[in-house]
Amino acid sequence: MAKVRLLSDRVANQIAAGEVIERPAAVVKELVENALDAGATRVEVEFRHGGRSLMRIEDNGHGMSKDDALMALERHATSKIEEADDLNRLASFGFRGEALPSIASVSRFELQTREAGSDVGTEILVNGGKFVHVRECGRPVGTRIEVTHLFNSVPARRKFLKTDATEAAHIIQGVRLYALAFPGVAFSLIEDGRVIFKSPQCATLAERVTEIFGRQVGEGLVPLDASEQGMKVSGLIGRPGQGRSTRHEMIVFINQRPVDSRTLNYALIESYHESLPKGRYPSAFVFFEIDPAAVDVNVHPAKREVRFRSESQVRSFVIRSVLARLRELSAEASAQQVNVVSLAGNGEVVRPAMSTAVETVKASSAEPGAGLSVSGGESGKALVAPVPAFAPQVSVRDLRPVVTAGVFAAQPVVAVPQVAAGNSAAVTPTVPVGKSRAWRYLGLAHGSYALFETAAGLVLLDRRAAHERIWFERLQAQFRAGETPVQRLLFAVPLELDPVATALMIDRLAFFNGHGFEIAEFGRGFFRIESVPAWMEPADAEPFVRDLLGALRDGRMQDKNVDVARDELARLAVTKAIRLPDTTSESEMQSLVAQLFACETPLTSPAGRPTQIELGHGELARRFQK
């Protein structure tokens, strides 16, 4: 049996690093937290090659003396707690006392610091856990830490790192969270010498959200503020009906600490149950405050998760607060609609803004750079809306017919949208009609299910699933052939993205532009959608592109395999765009069946749901006990 022995400090630190320092973003997180705990009002983060070769965090906090700097590199050294009972009253970020020695044990670690009142600073260099030198240096008050060659001393750990782009995305996301948590602190983030974002001190959370996530996201948010029995929830939440396909813009903080709280996440999702369709998530930047003794922030080695003493009480309070705010917004929107909509003498609904379209056009023509977007509205009326000043200016002779087929239409069933002049429209395939004629249409149940009589019994057809399958295979064929019908927009649709989404978009512009879109970069974080696939409503372009980027961020859309990426694009398109009428005719349903059975896989939707359920004579007889 092997002898029991104590590990050396260097090995113990490297083992601790396995818990605390799992990737470069964890290093940045620990050092940014230390800067904020030190009272910094300015934090600058720089990294290169996804953090592998360099991470630099510099702040103007209160700094450290030489003795404190040396003590900070010892295991379990901290200024945050003295007794175990202090863990129940934690109001700071870093307190474990393992971060600095753990980082220094698996990298080349250089610390420069100077406290107020001291004439000189202190510089400490540690390489792979071994001290190289400790000496005086000149620097302003605050702390500067450089971490280079991460995991060089433990090559096995380095092999588990992802690509530079992936590791960079984690760093950017982490710094953004702390920038949101502390609007009053100026943050700078630099990647490979390029400024990702530079946000000055902001007076409000709304300003910081706009700085980081963009104006489009900021304008869709409303304030939230509620308190009850020692709990407070505040921040910004999305308006009813405005959802995202991922949770990337659903961010929660507990006592200013960014965390992944299942309790608060589910409370937010449940609050929007009446306001968003299933599978959509709200944009929310929510700050929850509670007595530190009522929450345990030490249940996870990296402090990413927390546990409440009373989960149900917290959950119900957040649901009530958010739901009350959403209902207020819905009531306000209804009141505004009542004020805006008036009835004409013939009973037709007229919107006042429509009647002033000519005046709007005249007014806009006097404003340099202003423009109007004209699209088809209900009953064929034209809707006129202002567009941003940077929309491309188009002369009359440059105009081409713009089609807004918009949805995968079901009247007539699965009709192929027409395409702008100069483009070749996809042709509806010739399909056998024997199958459809063998099914006798009986009627529509609950607006979703078509009932047919067949020689074998009865068939229930899911209309949506059938439309999705037909359109999915049609789009697959278009993508493979490289012949996606395109509609050129009269006015470009502006798209403002956060830094992570911007990087994803730039890397995949060729893919987007090869599948019906024409998207051009228009400054840092800004893009213009100039063309969209013919089946898409221009108004749907911006949210659809955001959903695609969300699928890329979540890993649901693997762009390394083009065929797989195309299938996911087609699957997302049919899921988002199909809209079914409340009623349908027998001829349309017969056409639907004929086109469905012309598909390669007619029995299931692209998501794997059945398109139909058959009840044979035997099953019917059994049910009726014959």
Image (cartoon, grey):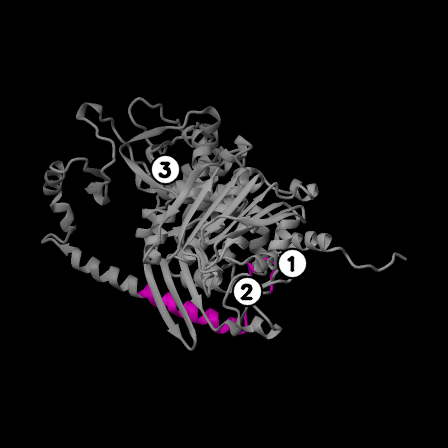
Q: Secondary structure at mark 1?
A: loop
Mark 1 is surrounded, within 10 Å at the Cα level, by few (under 14), some (14 to 19) or many (20 or more) other residues, namely some
Q: Nearer the viewer, residue 520 or 181?
A: 181
Q: CA distance from mark 1 to mark 2?
A: 27 Å
- Disc 2 to disc 3, how far (Cα)? 36 Å
At which x and y percent is residue 510? 44, 29
Instruction: Tell which tag, 3 or 1, sits nearer the viewer.
Output: 1
Which residue: 19% across, 23% down? Answer: 397
Tell which of 445 and 568 is nearer to you: 568
Q: Which residue is mark 1?
A: 74
Above or below for 65 versus 109: below
Residue 257: x %, y % from top left: 48, 61
Residue visible at 18% across and 38% down in the picture? 370
Observer-side mark, 1 or 2, equals: 1
- Residue 356 image position (x, y, % from top left): 11, 45
For the residue pair 264 and 42, the one nearer the viewer reads as: 42
Measured as percent of width and height from the top left, residue 2 is found at: 88, 56
Q: Amino acid at mark 1?
A: Glu
Query: Which residue is under mark 2?
Result: 306
Residue 483, numbered circle: none
In the figure, is residue 41 to the left or right of 16? left
Q: Which residue is mark 3?
A: 524
What range is drawn magenta here? 299-327
Whether residue 250 appears in magenta in the rendering, the answer is: no
| Kind of residue at badge 2 | Val
The C terminus, quarter of image: bottom right
Q: Earlier in the sequence, mark 2 or mark 3?
A: 2
Residue at the image point whose x is 58% and y is 49% from the top:
135
